[in-house]
Amino acid sequence: MDKDILLNVKELHTGFESPKGFIPAVTGVSFDIARGESVALVGESGCGKSVTAMSVMQLLSVPPARIEAEEIKYNGQDLMKFSAGKMREIRGNEISMIFQEPMTSLNPILKIGFQIAESLRIHRGLNKKEAWDEAVNMLRKVGIPDPEKRVNEYPHQLSGGMRQRVMIAIALSCRPNLLIADEPTTALDVTIQAQILELIADLQEETGMSLLLITHNMGIVAQMADRVMVMYAGQIVESTDVDTIFDNPAHPYTIGLLESIPSADEKVKTLNIIEGTVPSPMFYPKGCRFAPRCPYADEKCAAVQPSLSNIGNGHLCRCHYPKNTKGGGQL
Amino acid sequence: MSDILVETKELCEYFQVKKGFLSSEKQTLKAVDRVSVTISKGETLGLVGESGCGKTTFGKTILYLNRPTSGQVLYDGTDIGTLSKEDLRKLRLRMQIVYQDPYGSLNTRMSVGDILQEPMVYHRLCTKKESHEKVRELLEQVGLRTFHESRYPHEFSGGQRQRIAIARALAVDPEFIVCDEPVSALDVSVQSQVLNLLSELKEKRGLTYLFISHDLSVVRHISDRIGVMYLGQMVETAPEEELFRSRLHPYTKALFDAMPVPKSGVRLKRTTLQGDLPSPINPPSGCHFRTRCPYCTEKCSQVQPVLKDVGNGHFVACHLFDK
């Protein structure tokens, strides 16, 4: 069963040194992604979603960052033991990443064709001509009209949606096994967002790559993911398949989060809310990190931190009283 | 519902933009193009559309923060354009705005107390002493604590800042508030807190809102009536329930289809809408939506459709509904 696991992260701890002290951004995150699987990592801003992805890719500068993990295994190799040079071969070739802001991730003074061809020349060793032709191919593949002409344009000549298509073309040009998409559509309008998500899903079907999708939008999760991991305050608090997360969420945070989204199906007078705000990483509570905002919290929650445990069928939940289980009477 | 508070008649807001970096040639960008709407007293009109469709410009023009190129804004029956500077200043007591970005809209060098006092002092509403009392009242109304008065904006989270911005708008006891994407910059769990606050204030004070957002589910939650804008024009308006029951304009349909729904069993749908938003500088002739519309006919490229009444308070600007 374990043999088709592509990425396995165990006990990842990432933090940052700052003048005010050490900031623990990600604390004890473990997860795996199987070949061809789409996993969504959801959570609110500052919960450590992006830092988790950046740690896997080793894109954080050390120091100020401090990355510790039992292991980050990709295809059986431990990425933590890799040298910077070896890691560069993995990035782009094996694992690719697309970011939220397509304007700032593209170089404004280079033609987009050059930017796609660059990774092809470095990673796949193509010569200039071949790489350029392949760049045109990639542009066509991601649905850019008139690719022969567009390949000579600069990022500022393209719209936001087109730029994100170029980013995807760059990320996929070396046929990675894993694509990490960090809020790929957050800066885009809904109709463009739908096009980009469709494109990612199509390309995934075609190439069989795995997808780690980072987002805060539960609607996108419902459309794209096979499995969902919900993060809160640097930890994974719930992890299960996509249907269970919407039909049978067990963690009070997940439940609160889903209830606080205004529904387009029915109108309610007042929305359910989660009281309070996310705690600052410098002052995480001693017990359960959600306890101060949790309507069901008791003394045990304030004192003892719950572990991420299996509550049946691989449904993981970090709560002393998960819903729909024995002893979860409070919910 | 016949008590109309705000009415726009053929409101236009055009901007002159340079054709190129070094060129002196000017082009016209029609940000808001002949928009006529009415907002009744106590009503919330939601305005949805994609970025660049003119939602925000419309919200600003309705308050005369931009002078309209042509057309009229009638506030409580008076044409704002005919008012003197002094009268317009007085009218501002009755209409306020809450902006999208709570990080940019509050002066970082002023304490919360000063921020909330400023509008009262500017409009000479009360003495310094009274204003102190009022500030405390306002803070409590928006769910903050009275000791927050002496704090500065950087000490607050995004949701709290948006509460401060709302309190500032309320400081002069307005009756009409333009909410320009007030929750877009906030996290979901905080967003619902602010939405509830807005509903609660509306009920308590009998406020009228123009609520601008790109998020359909948020707009549905808060609005009584919804207007959909595309490239500076209103393409469909209808009461909230009516619009969610039957969407007529192809653009509204596409917008609803594109919105991801957070529930199980909804895998990715095939989208009907292809292509990008055209530039508002040179919008397509005839119907602006025709370049992306699956039902486009020859007539669409020649004649610009206007809003037509199709019953139930539902208006749509599309040739498909010509009789």
Image (tube, coloured by chain):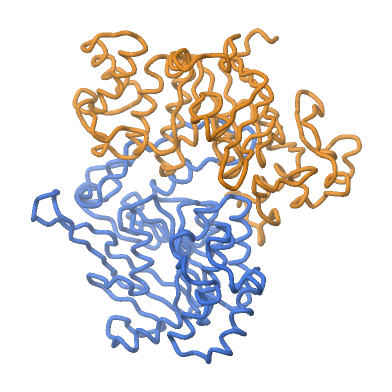
Above/below status of B14 relative to A131 = below
Residue B50 can be seen, yes or no: yes
Left or right, A101 with reference to A310: left
> Percent from the top left, x then y, of residue A304?
84, 40
Q: Position of residue A265 (x, y in %)?
A: 60, 49
Question: Can you give x and y, in whole percent of width and height, for residue A230 in the image?
Answer: 66, 36
**What colour denotes chain B?**
blue
- Can you see residue B238? no
On screen, residue A122 above or below A170:
above
Marks counted in the figure total 0
- Check the image and report above or below for B149 versus A7: below
Q: Name the residue at 70% across, 53% down.
A: A274
At 57% across and 39% down in the image, what residue appears? Answer: A17
Camera-side residue: B57 or A32? A32
Residue B10 image position (x, y, % from top left): 28, 69
Answer left or right for B24 relative to B278. left
Q: Which chain is orange?
A: A
Q: Is residue A95 left or right of residue B298?
A: right
